[in-house]
Image (cartoon, rainbow, N blue to C red):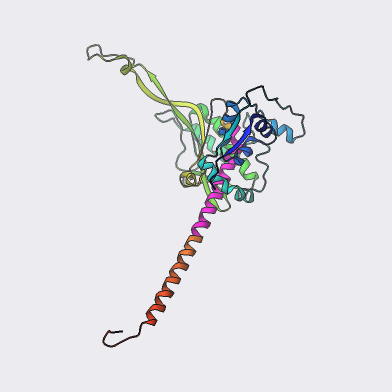
């Protein structure tokens, strides 16, 4: 039966977002955490601020914001097709992950880089020694460096984010290594590559010199468009070209009001989901191959029976 979504009141959704982290709640309804946050904003439903769940888990007293007055409306939450497909991997994710606490306690990116991972130290030296390309971004060489392509001013921030991701993965028992110019982790023997990059923005500026003897140009055509670093970072699962077909998220971006640092739990969960999707896909493909072999065997058996049932005649007549 097709899932047409869930209906609830503002009060019900308010109670739910204060009883369960939004990353986990969103999975229940088959949408992204960003999508659920937008629904809350649309209906003026306050959500826990950053650090709320960590303080609560540590036993600190936390304050729940009351639901502001508003119209009594029915909220419809419709599963996203990709998220709905991804939900089938949730049970596999729980079996892959050694702990299901990542959604309860937020993964915090520190403001300063302390005791960096060896790969971070190595990559920092390489990136800081490289020159920006034509777009103002420094990119890693073919080997020996984490997959980080950002502007000079964003290098330290990108390193802090990657350091947090690497340490979180290793804490959960998944190693991180460099291979073929990619940053990779291996989850249940499934290699997954990921990296961080900076988006480019369009900057328009007038040329310094004008040819007054040339033909007249309209004002809008006298501007030169340049692609420059925007300061917005994006974490990407590179293998998600296939995983995306299974319903797996591929990119985690800076938002207007929420930075990438606040989406670490969602990204790590995305890596686990991608691994679970690959495991499930390989299992289905193997089962389908076994079914194909069995069908072929049965067909050969039937053909053999038919062949033996036909009497032979030297004249070719039956």
Identify the residue shown where x is 46% and y is 35%: 139
* Residue visible at 52% across and 47% down in the picture: 192
Please name whichever residue, 6 or 25, is drawn nearer the observer in this view of the structure. 6
Task: Tell me which residue sits at (41%, 31%) in the image.
Answer: 133
| Residue 43 position within the rendered picture, expressed as x and y whole percent measured from the top left | 60, 26
The reply to whether residue 97 is in sight is yes
Secondary structure of the magenta portion, mostly?
A: helix
Quarter of the figure that contains the C terminus: bottom left
Residue lying furthest top in this view? Answer: 212
Q: Is residue 143 above or below residue 231?
A: below
Nearest to the observer: residue 39 or residue 159: 39
Range drawn in magenta: 262-286
Was residue 283 drawn as part of the magenta stretch in this picture?
yes
Instruction: Give the image quarter of residue 109.
Output: top right
Q: Position of residue 234 (x, y in %)?
A: 51, 34
Residue 265 picture location, percent across and down? 61, 38
Residue 146 visible, this angle: no
């Amino acid at each position: 039966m097709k899932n047409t979504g869930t209906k609830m009141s503002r009060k019900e959704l308010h109670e739910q977002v204060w009883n369960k982290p939004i990353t986990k709640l969103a999975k229940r309804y088959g949408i992204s955490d960003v999508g659920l946050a937008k629904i809350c904003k649309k209906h003026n439903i306050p959500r826990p601020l950053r650090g709320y769940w960590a303080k609560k888990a540590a036993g600190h007293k936390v304050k729940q914001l009351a639901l502001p007055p508003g119209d009594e409306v029915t909220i419809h939450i419709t599963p996203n097709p990709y998220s709905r497909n991804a939900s089938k991997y949730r049970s596999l994710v729980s079996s892959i992950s050694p702990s299901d606490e990542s959604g309860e306690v937020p993964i915090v990116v520190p403001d300063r880089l302390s005791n960096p991972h060896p790969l971070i130290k190595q990559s920092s030296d390489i990136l800081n020694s490289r020159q920006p390309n034509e777009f103002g971004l420094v990119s890693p060489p073919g080997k020996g460096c984490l997959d980080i392509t950002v502007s000079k001013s964003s290098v330290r921030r990108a390193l802090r984010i990657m350091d947090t991701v690497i340490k979180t993965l290793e804490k959960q028992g998944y190693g991180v290594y460099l291979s073929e110019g990619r940053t990779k982790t291996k989850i249940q023997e499934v290699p997954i590559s990921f990296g961080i990059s900076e988006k480019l923005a369009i900057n328009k500026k007038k040329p310094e010199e004008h040819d007054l003897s040339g033909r007249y140009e309209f004002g809008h055509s006298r501007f030169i468009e340049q692609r420059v670093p925007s300061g917005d970072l994006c974490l990407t699962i590179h293998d998600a070209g296939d995983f995306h077909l299974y319903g797996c998220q591929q990119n985690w971006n800076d938002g207007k009001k929420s930075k990438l640092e606040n989406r670490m739990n969602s990204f790590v969960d995305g890596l686990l989901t991608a691994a679970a999707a690959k495991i499930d896909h390989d299992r289905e493909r193997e089962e389908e191959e076994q079914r194909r072999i069995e069908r072929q065997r049965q067909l050969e058996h039937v053909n053999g029976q038919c062949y033996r049932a036909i009497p032979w005649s030297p004249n070719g007549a039956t």
